[in-house]
Image (cartoon, grey):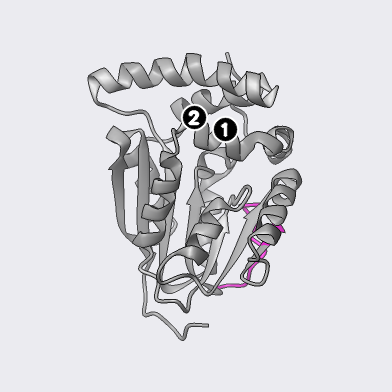
Amino acid sequence: MTDVSKSPAKIAGMFDAIAGRYDLLNHLLSAGIDRRWRRRAIRSLQLTGRERVLDLCTGTGDLAIAAVRAQPPAARVVGVDFSSAMLRVGDNKLAKAHLTDRITLVRGDAARIPLADASVDAVTIGFGIRNVERMDAACAELHRVLKPGGRLAILEFAMPDAPVFSGFYRWYTSTVLPIIGRVLSRNGSAYAYLPASISAFASPDEFVKILRQAGFTTISPIRLMLGSVILYTARRSGTVGTRH
């Protein structure tokens, strides 16, 4: 049985080991559809061009980049992740794209986000919340750093409930994906962890409950790709304050 324990040191070490091939495998294993999911998440924030955005579990910064390339774009993005190697890859991407003046990547823990209270207008997470050891603490932190009225968009994998597609999805994630991941990343354990972590993650109803307990309102789980990906949108209650 695959170990799905989520200690920060274990998760950071796993992603450090695959950082160099992470982007290639993301695009390959999703047939490029991951870019579309990220654009959909950014659209849900309803940006105006003035917002400061936090991208938690930013990895190599793909969702942060999507935010500043949207129309209208985010004014600035802070990306936070626990993996130093992923952040190094991300910094190189930002330098090549000339985006270092608009996106800052910082090493940090999702349960102790290194930002002030009510300091960001919106928060995104792309396929990272299931890797957090204490989801309740992380969601409470998201609520803390968001301004009143701020928007939240979280993309996460799920087990689809459509009978035929569900069987195919389980076969693909448990058999095909680990083989491709092992060959291209030379790290079999990381891509065995992926399907195991999806199966172990909270159901959409359970995760909505966690968000509600953290203080979020207007929570909506939007099923994408026949329910294999969920876009969770929510807001922090209150009146929107002065934007940056």
Tell me the tag on residue 29: 2
Are the residues tagged 2 and 1 within 8 Å (C-beta)? yes
- 107 inside magenta stretch: yes
The answer to whether 18 is drawn above or below residue 217 in the figure is above
- Quadrant containing the N terminus is top right
* Residue 19 drawn at (x, y percent): 69, 38
* Residue positioned 28% across, 22% down in the render: 165
Q: Callout 2: 10 Å neighbours few (<14), some, many (20+)? A: some
The one of 146 and 60 positioned closer to us in this rendering: 60
Amino acid of disc 1:
Leu
For image coordinates 29% across by 41% down, the residue present is 223
Could you say where residue 45 lies in the image, as x and y percent from the top left? 38, 64
Mark 2 and mark 1: Cα distance apart in space: 6 Å
Residue on which the image places disc 1: 25
Q: Residue at x 51, y 66 (%)?
A: 68
**Which secondary structure is most common in the magenta stretch?**
loop
Q: Where residue 5 sits: x, y (%)?
A: 62, 29
Examine the rendered structure and indicate whether residue 244 appears above or below residue 169: below
Residue 96, can we see it? yes
Q: Which stretch did the figure color magenta?
A: 105-117
